[in-house]
Amino acid sequence: MNHTFEVGVKSSGIHANAAAVSELEAHLGYWLRFVSTHVSHSFQKKAEANGVTVSEWVVLREMFRLGCTSPTTLAQVAGMSKGAVSKLIDRLESKGMVSKSILLADRRQHSIELTAEGEALVPVLAGMADQNDEEFFGQLPPPLRESLLEAMKEVARTHQLKSEPLN
């Protein structure tokens, strides 16, 4: 059975209500996603050239800040699930960037810390992240750049955005 629907369609093939529907490019969210995708892809290539993924970089950076910590604490501060953090820690451990120790009091708990190799890589990657930001946002006048950063933080606060959305 073949159904043909032409409700609201002009003979030119353009929807009759097209003028009432906002353009894709009129949405701030469109431009945020568009720019974010390019910024993230650029940094992803830089991180991968140094043997880590962007998610691994996030874990390394948070561990650098926290020092010796637990996977549970790391998951909370990184805004990731415990399962995701556990997998990332295992990958980083296999790359020699993280070491795990079983706590004697409770063999189910681990402490984790950066190895010398992991500790040395964090400033390198942080410099690349700074360079990446400069490549994309360096042409903006400093007050505009600061306003954009504060606006994004305010949106995150208002909506209580703490982690990446799950698909």
Image (cartoon, rainbow, N blue to C red):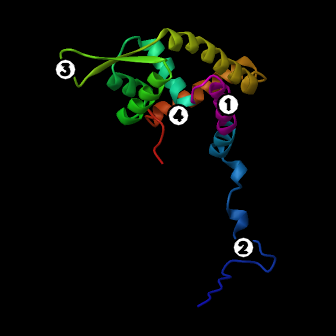
Q: Residue furthest bottom?
A: 1
Q: Nearer the viewer, mark 4 or mark 3?
A: 3
Query: Residues at badges 3 and 1 in contact (C-beta under 8 Å)?
Result: no
N-terminal label among 3 and 1: 1
In this view of the protein, which residue sits in the foreground, 164 or 86? 86
Is label 3 in a helix, a strand or a loop? loop
Is label 1 in a helix, a strand or a loop? helix
Q: Nearer the viewer, mark 1 or mark 2?
A: 1
Whether residue 68 is situated above or below residue 29 in the rendered picture: above
89 sits to left or right of 55: left
Say if the magenta span includes residue 50.
yes
Q: Which residue is mark 3?
A: 106
Q: Which residue is mark 4?
A: 155
**Image quarter in which the N terminus is found:** bottom right
**Dot 2: few (<14), some (14–19), or many (≥20) neighbours within 10 Å?**
few
Measured in 3D between alpha carbons, the distance from the residue under mark 1 to the one under mark 2, in whole angstroms, is: 44 Å
Query: Residues at badges 4 and 2 in contact (C-beta under 8 Å)?
Result: no
Q: Main secondary structure of the magenta part?
A: helix
N-terminal label among 3 and 2: 2
Q: Which mark is residue 119?
A: none
Please, what is the three-letter code of the amino acid marked with disc 2? Ala
Q: Which residue is mark 2?
A: 16
Is label 2 in a helix, a strand or a loop? loop
Q: In the image, which residues are magenta? A: 36-53
Residue 69's x, y, as percent? Answer: 35, 16
Residue 154's x, y, as percent? Answer: 52, 29
Please, what is the three-letter code of the amino acid marked with disc 4? Val
